[in-house]
Amino acid sequence: MGNGIEEHRAALRAIPLFAALPDDQLALLAEVAATVDVAPGRTIARQGEVGSGLFVILEGRVRVVRDGETLTRLGRGEFFGELSVLDRLPRVASVVAEEPTRCLAIAAWDAEQLLLAHPAVTLALLRTLAGRLRQTTTDHHH
């Protein structure tokens, strides 16, 4: 499959959150990020634990669970863990792989540097966050 970084960079390029990043920055991100492979049924992030960083889904599917209730499902190109990066507080939900899932893990400190250096990425993150927030505040049906 050629060299990992190159592959990594192509994967990152396809993610809407990182669309605005120039190549050299993507390369940098690919270097600091770790790839994590998760088996179905395994928990990637646990509710109540202090988050270690931002996760971007490269392949697969996860479900977001709060207090035993599935809130939503996320797939390729989507991310989670951003709240813990922003406030350094315990995770508000657990994230469980529903199928073989490959994530890109970006340590909180690296994610913070990325957001500080690239307003376009910060804005993309905030837009997603705003959309999720709006959903939870307007969505009272089950």
Image: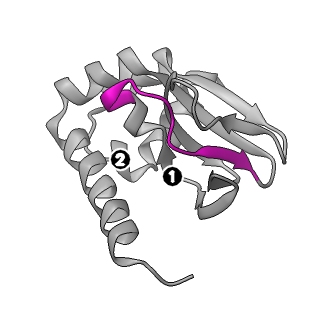
The residue nearer to you, when weighing 117 against 23, is 117
Dot 2, how many residues are within 10 Å of its Cα: few (below 14), some (14-19), or many (20+)?
A: many
- At mark 1, the secondary structure is loop
Which quarter of the figure is the C terminus placed in? bottom right
Membership of 122 in magenta stretch: no
Q: Is tag 2's residue or tag 1's residue first in the polypeptide sequence? A: 2
Q: Position of residue 71 (x, y in %)?
A: 57, 63
- At mark 2, the secondary structure is helix
Which residue is labeled 1 in the image?
77
Proximity of marks 2 and 1: CB atoms separated by less than 8 Å: yes
38 relative to 25 in the view: left or right: right
Q: Quadrant of residue 118?
A: top left
Range drawn in magenta:
85-97
Rendered residue at 50%/84% (across/down): 141
Which quarter of the figure is the N terminus placed in? top right
Rounded to the nearest angstrom, the CA distance separating label 2 from label 1 is 8 Å
Does residue 125 sit above or below 34 in this rendering? below
Per the rendering, the mark at residue 116 is none
49 relative to 134 in the view: left or right: right
Which residue is labeled 2 in the image?
17
